[in-house]
Image (spheres, rainbow, N blue to C red):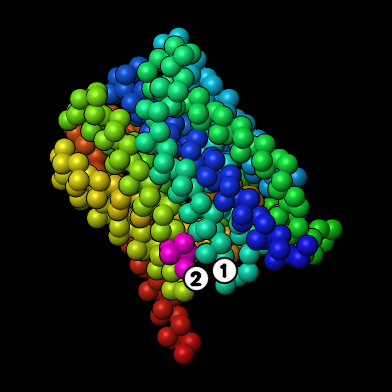
Amino acid sequence: MSVTGVQRRTLALLAVTQIIGGIGVAIGITVGALLSARMAGVGLSGLPGSGAVIGSALLAVPVTRLVQARGRRPGLVLAYLVGALGAVLVVLAAVAGSVPLLFLGMFLFGGGTAANLQARYVAVDLAEPGRRGRDLSLVVWSATIGSVAAPNLADLADRAVAGLRLPVLSGAFVVSGVAFALAALVLLVLLRPDPLLLARTRDGSVGSSAPQVVGVRAGARVVARLPAARLAIAAVATGHAVMVAVMSMTPVHLGEGHSDADLLRVVGIVLSVHIAGMYGLSPVTGWLADWYGRRAVIIGGLALLLAACVIAGTAGHDTPRLTLGLALLGLGWSGTMVGGSTLLSESVPPGSRPAVQGLSDLVMGVAGASAGAFSGVVVALAGYGTLTVVAAMAALPVLALALRFRLATAERISRCG
């Protein structure tokens, strides 16, 4: 099979597993904040979600080493299996009423998120330079089907496992565990040849003297020398932190204005629209990144995040306005994620990419986890509106950096002309 054929087959396979994995991630995220609020209280309700984010981030370290040594397939399979184990532990925590076990389960649950995020880089391994943004965005978009449907399946999942006499809200994690295990099995059997190993063979880096950078520390040294890579990581991390902070507390905020009977339905609608914003238009975002440039898309994404914070923060309990704010929040995340990830992948040497990509996911995860943990405290002390102000302030420095970088590039081009 030609390289082009392998790339098409890889994209199709990634699309399938992104749908399956997207269901697992989204249904757990939707219910996780509500389950945490009931078990740990509103003030600590952001911590289990942050545990999932930090788990995803820290898992990037061993996954990156495994990818560097053996290719993409083992890394993705490991991440999904860890996520499945985490889902099982969350169910056991709900049964036992154990908050520490809930934290541990959500920490490991982050493996599913790690796998879904790592998949975007698999799409770039064999992509032609002029199609990197679009191929990466197609993988991101593939999560739309599962991710948008999943929030509305939370109530159905609870009813489906009613015979097991599990606590309310824990059924969603049964579905997550099954989804992650299935995605791991599909990749283990079908992701052959491995895209990264084939790319190395095609580029002649196997057996050559080209340096292979291993580990996130070595990746950090590479990034320190490359301004474009620094901007890319800053954009991805900031976009993710703003999104996690606002999104994770929106179900809790909605819970203050709706009865238990309506809460899951309303949360499902709002988060479905939000997730549609994250993934639904990502092919357009990828096309814009290829056509107008990665930095322009990053700037647009940051601007949308600011608009989202303004609208959601002033919405009160107006559900339609909150829904609009969360939709823009998703679109802004898409811009920073697609634009930043594509810029990162092409701004570093081939031998450094897995390490730098792992570093990016680690930084993104730590930023998101910190934002998630901080968000619960801010909402408990000062309210949801204050949280959106703080989130918007976090995006401003990176927007200024991106604008400065873009202007500096334009000036250099002008001088050269």
Q: Judge whether residue 412 can be spotted in this image.
A: yes
Q: Residues within 10 Å of mark 2 (few under 14, many from 20)?
A: some
How far from the left and from the top, in percent, is residue 407? 37, 74
Q: Judge whether residue 63 can be spotted in this image.
A: no
How far from the left and from the top, in percent, is residue 27? 43, 34
What residue sits right under mark 2 in the picture? 290
Does dot 1 land on a helix, a strand or a loop?
helix
The residue under label 2 is which amino acid type?
Answer: Asp
Work out which quarter of the rendered image holds the N terminus and state it: bottom right
Residue 333 higher or lower than 252, as above or below: below
How far from the left and from the top, in percent, is residue 182? 61, 35
Residues tagged 2 and 1 counted as in contact (Cβ below 8 A): yes
Q: Earlier in the sequence, mark 2 or mark 1?
A: 1
Tell me the number on the disc at residue 131.
1
Which range is magenta?
A: 283-287
Q: Please indicate whether residue 158 sits to the left or right of residue 382 in the image.
A: right
| Image point (17%, 30%), residue name | 257
Residue 284 belongs to magenta span: yes
Q: Please indicate whether residue 245 sits to the left or right of residue 194 in the image.
A: left
Residue 187 higher or lower than 54, as above or below: below
Q: Nearer the viewer, residue 199 or 227?
A: 199
Residue 33 higher or lower than 67, as above or below: above
Does dot 2 land on a helix, a strand or a loop?
helix
The residue under label 1 is which amino acid type?
Answer: Arg
Residue 51 higher or lower than 142, as above or below: above
Q: Residues within 10 Å of mark 1 (few under 14, many from 20)?
A: some
